[in-house]
Image (cartoon, grey):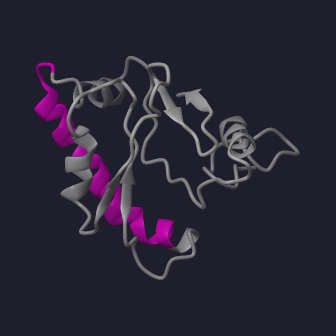
Amino acid sequence: MDCRTCRGPVQAGFARCYQCDLAHARCGGLLADVVAPVAYAVKGGPLAGDLWRYKSGAAGATEAGARVAAMLAGYLREHGDQVWRAAGMAAGPELAAVVPSGQGRTGPHPLLGIVASYVDVPIIPLSAAPGAAARARGLADGVAAGW
């Protein structure tokens, strides 16, 4: 059985995976209508490296960003319509939001530029929770959770 939110694996008898259930409980029942994982990165693998490098400013960041952008574009081209339908939408979104990694980076997150180059909608930048520990994001009820 798949998680009703992210389509990931769940234990028998549960509607959501552990992470989605935890987010649901901490946010007073608020949860994304649909989560569409674009890819899974295995620690130490090429995609994991690209996902770190494109936002690091380190050597190879531009090339890593191009690979991440191409992956996102391919996903949206092949599966975007399915995601919109799963969310109960007749067409694509009217807005996009980008959630920062919470590393304390100054300036706009590189993902903003990648998303902006592939979707023609206003982008709402979200902020990491003020005062939260590094590698944490604020949830709807103000609780910080590390991801």
The front one of 141 and 13 is 141
Taking the magenta stretch, the answer to whether it contains residue 133 is no
Query: From the viewer's perspective, is residue 103 above or below residue 27?
Result: above
Taking the magenta stretch, the answer to whether it contains residue 82 is yes
**Tally of numbered tags:** 0
Q: In the rendered view, does 123 fall on the left or right side of 15?
A: left
Q: Residue 115, percent across and down?
A: 26, 53
What residue is at 42 percent from the left and 48 percent from the top?
A: 38
What residue is at 64 percent from the left and 53 percent from the top?
A: 31
Magenta stretch: give its range: 58-84
What residue is at 47 percent from the left and 34 percent from the top?
A: 129
**Residue placed furthest toward the bottom:** 90
Query: From the viewer's perspective, is residue 142 above or below residue 135?
Result: below
Q: Residue 56, percent across and down?
A: 22, 23
The front one of 80 and 95 is 95
Q: In the rendered view, does 7 fall on the left or right side of 52?
A: right
Residue 95 visible in the current orientation: yes
The front one of 56 and 68 is 56
Q: Residue 140, percent across and down?
A: 60, 46
The front one of 78 and 102 is 102
**Residue placed furthest toward the right:** 13
Residue 70 visible in the current orientation: no
**Residue placed furthest toward the front:** 131
Q: Residue 104, percent across and down?
A: 33, 24
Q: In the rendered view, does 24 fall on the left or right side of 39?
A: right
Quarter holding residue 43: top left
What residue is at 53 percent from the left and 74 percent from the top?
A: 85
Q: Name the main secondary structure of what is drawn in magenta.
A: helix
Q: In the rendered view, does 106 fall on the left or right side of 34?
A: left
Quarter holding residue 54: top left
